Amino acid sequence: MEPSFVTILSCDLPAPDARRYLVTVRASIADHGGREVKPAGAGLLATFTSPVAAVRCAVTMQIDAEAAGHGLCVGLDAGEPLADGDNLYGEPISVAGRLCDAARPGEILATELVRQLVVRQREIRVHPRGSVRLKGVAETVAIATVAWRAEPDEAAERILAAPDHHTAVVMLTTFDLNEYVYEALRIGASGFLLKDAPADRLLDAIRAAARGDALLAPSITRRLIGHFAGAARPSPGGLPDELAGLTERELEVFRMMARGMSNAELAAELVLTENTVKTHVARVLGKLGLRARVQAVVLAYETGFVTREG
């Protein structure tokens, strides 16, 4: 790799599960256009030509890790490293590594330079933390913290929490996995689209929500399924306790809902009318205490009723 101005991400993986996490982290890096450079001890080192992509990748990694009960230590710097074959070295590499060492589990530390490079991205929240001395780095380094967890004042939660609500919520996000997505789906949002989705796609989402269907951007669907399916295991007793109240037909409908099938697709597959399908869907959601179809997807994977293979 020729030396050039890049953003460097250094990440330590949780020791007991390092090998398993390496697959997930590498997938996140590839999804965000990064390039793995070399192993960094038990961790990982990657470069990105876009600082925004690097920060978004770090956020994705932390969300995936937290869902599995862990927190990663992540450090970010930007600059022009020196190259020796596939290996990179120099000050930005050292600083990123030292920031990773200084970070607590679940923390993303970045240099002030990285903060300045991404500050115009409104959905990325990076807060200055002053200057620190890092081991092995001659000068003090101005650093910042990337905030990636949900804010406590999300409006969708208040709307969907109303006991007599009849409002469907379709949310827009700037990138395909941020700190709001999973929680919003759990509380009953009907869909998620990227902000650059064309107008007709947005109208389709609104119409789908009004019909009681759900619509997710394909990249969000892949993340959602991968996020829950990665940890899901089939229930050892056969049927998870949460689903014990469903009839055989309702279980069949529930499984198809979890696969993202619309009412029209369900009707065609089961050779039923759409009105009959709507009745089955309403009963499934009612028995499970769910407000929206997307919540059914989450529950199906969380309980292991549906897995990536099954």
Image (spheres, grey):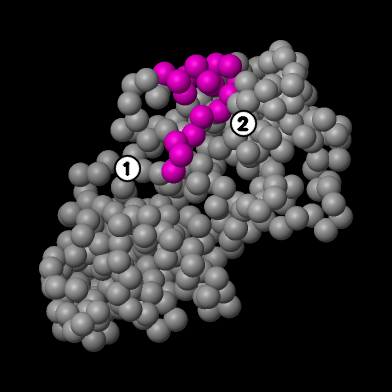
Mostly what secondary structure, the magenta segment?
A: helix
Q: Position of residue 76 (x, y in %)?
A: 28, 66
Residue at image position (53%, 20%) is 208
Which x, y percent locates residue 168?
Answer: 54, 21
What segment is highlighted magenta in the picture?
A: 203-219
Does any portion of residue 195 appear in the rendered image?
yes
The amino acid at mark 2 is: Met
Residue under circle 2? 261
Residue 29 vs residue 260: left or right?
left
State yes or no: discs 1 and 2 in contact (Cβ < 8 Å). Answer: no
Report the quarter where the N terminus lies.
bottom left
**Which mark, residue 137?**
none
Q: Is residue 195 left or right of residue 271?
A: left
Query: 254 above or below 67?
Result: above
Give the distance between the C-alpha atoms of the residues marked 1 and 2, in whole angstroms.
31 Å
**The disc label shown at residue 123, or none:** 1
Percent from the top left, x then y, of residue 308? 63, 52
Q: Earlier in the sequence, mark 1 or mark 2?
A: 1
